[in-house]
Amino acid sequence: MLIDNHNRVINYVRLAVTDRCNLRCNYCMPEEGIAFSDRKSLLSIDEMKRLCNILVGQGVDKIRITGGEPFVRKDLMKLLAYITKLEGLKEVSITTNATLIGPHIEQLEDFGINSINVSLDAITPETFHRITRRDQFELVRENLMRLIESEIAVRINFIVLEGQNE
């Protein structure tokens, strides 16, 4: 069992599988980009599988997959296929910008993914483009609607940006 310095049981972890993102949100990333971590310094899928196995063995029963944008990681589905079968793990959730999730929605349902948090800071294409510097609003909207129609619980994360999306 994992216990923090305040004697609280740790049963939930967030696992950032990448620092990369395919959007360039103006509150998160400068227009010219950033220096991403060297891929060799990131954990491999096998290392993350081992880590998750150890964490679940220590009492973690909820894992949230985050990034950057988790779905830019080409081998993400291999990790999800593995961890969703770990005995003792009750909940696997993902935070995504929903640009790349479309081809995976049915498989995520089959894996038993509990919930998806979609980061969406705009409800119009113009505002979406101004914030993300990308023209992918319709794709995100389509993927969001497909997620809502699925068996997966969906939440929307929204950052209020003064003068941009209030």
Image (tube, helix red, strand yellow):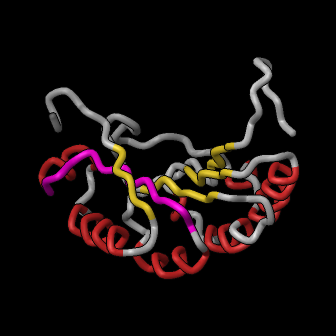
Is 97 on the left or on the right of 95, as rendered? left
List x then y, in percent, for residue 73: 58, 64
Question: In the depicted view, which residue is nearer to us: 16 or 6?
Answer: 6
List x then y, in percent, for residue 23: 37, 53
The magenta stretch spans residue 120: yes
Q: Is residue 128 above or below residue 109?
A: above
Is 36 on the left or on the right of 40, as rendered? left
Q: Is residue 103 above or below residue 12?
A: below
Question: In the depicted view, which residue is nearer to us: 60 or 100?
Answer: 60
Q: Residue at x 30, y 50 (%)?
A: 120
The magenta stretch spans residue 60: no
Quarter that holds the C terminus:
top left
List x then y, in percent, for residue 11: 73, 42
Please give the count of numbered marks on the rendered protein. 0
Q: Residue at x 39, y 59 (%)?
A: 154
Q: Tell me where residue 82 sits by quadrant.
A: bottom right
Q: Is residue 106 above or below residue 18?
A: below
List x then y, in percent, for residue 163: 14, 29
Q: Residue at x 46, y 67 (%)?
A: 152
Q: Tell me where residue 159 sits by quadrant.
A: top left
Q: Residue at x 77, y 33 (%)?
A: 9
Quarter that holds the N terminus:
top right
Read off the magenta span.
113-125
Question: In the depicted view, which residue is nearer to us: 26 or 64?
Answer: 64
Question: In the depicted view, which residue is nearer to us: 114 or 44?
Answer: 114
